[in-house]
Amino acid sequence: PGESAKPDAVANRVYVALYGGSGRVAVIDAVKNSLIDCLSANAGTFGVAINPALKHLYVTNRDGKNLMVFDISKTPATLVQDFSLGGVPFQVQYNGFTNQVYVAVAFDQPDYSKPTTLRVFTANAQGVTNFTTKTVGNSDPGGTLWVGLTNGYLYLAASTANQLEIYNPNTLALEKKITMTDPYGIAENVNLGRIYVTQRRGNSVRVDTIFNPVTPTAT
């Protein structure tokens, strides 16, 4: 498997990135726990994200250096857009508060191991369109991007910099940095108002309160 799996609670589907030479995304029926489809992607399928409003699936292909958008309203899903990124993409996330897609991309040749560019796209029925780019902390290959479930704030596990970075989704301004030891994975508990961050070299999990200075508005 790749680095990402995403559930679709409405359709009872789970999408799993299958990293490999050809690149695929497994579609699993969450009720029956059975494989119902396998989408052809590109080499090195790495990240997946879901837009529930448009019923689109966003797929990053590391070796293919592209972002693919699939219409998942029906089975089998159909390809809507194949977007060349020019660099190597890693994690991808969709923000429903701003209707934007975030992709962490590495441009450092020849290794392409430092995803310090955040590509930001506007989602639409035809796929995505360019919105802006921003330099961010090095999340190392695979460090998590996370969109806050209650307010849309963007959390980035900047592993190499040993810090968790929190960005305002409306301005993309860096709102806060929290020092950690090699942060990597991120999860959120809305009921308890907490963010959980795994620290690889720290061999621990850091627990913080959800960052919530203001509630963002859609753009």
Image: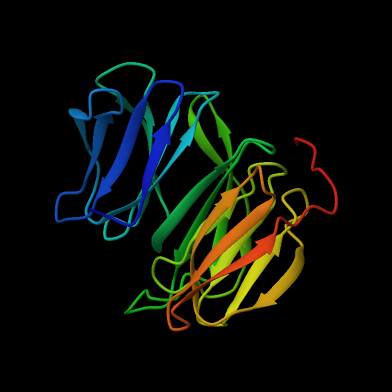
Q: Is residue 57 above or below residue 210?
A: above
Image quadrant where residue 210 sits: bottom right
Residue extending farthest to the left is 21
Q: Nearer the viewer, residue 67 or 181?
A: 181
| Label tally | 0
Left of 41 or right of it: where is 124? right
Q: Position of residue 165 (x, y in %)?
A: 65, 68
Q: Position of residue 185 (x, y in %)?
A: 47, 63
Residue extending farthest to the top is 74
Q: Nearer the viewer, residue 86 or 123?
A: 123
Q: What colouring style does the render use?
A: rainbow
Q: Residue at x 50, y 82 (%)?
A: 160
Q: Quadrant of the C terminus?
A: top right
Left of 10 or right of it: where is 26? left
Q: Nearer the viewer, residue 197 or 51?
A: 197
Q: Is residue 180 above or below residue 153?
A: below
Left of 92 or right of it: where is 65? left
Residue extending farthest to the right is 214
Q: Position of residue 126 (x, y in %)?
A: 48, 27
Q: Residue at x 40, y 60 (%)?
A: 90
> Can I make out residue 24 in this image?
yes
Q: Position of residue 39 (x, y in %)?
A: 23, 34
> Can I make out residue 86 in this image?
no
Q: Residue at x 37, y 74 (%)?
A: 112
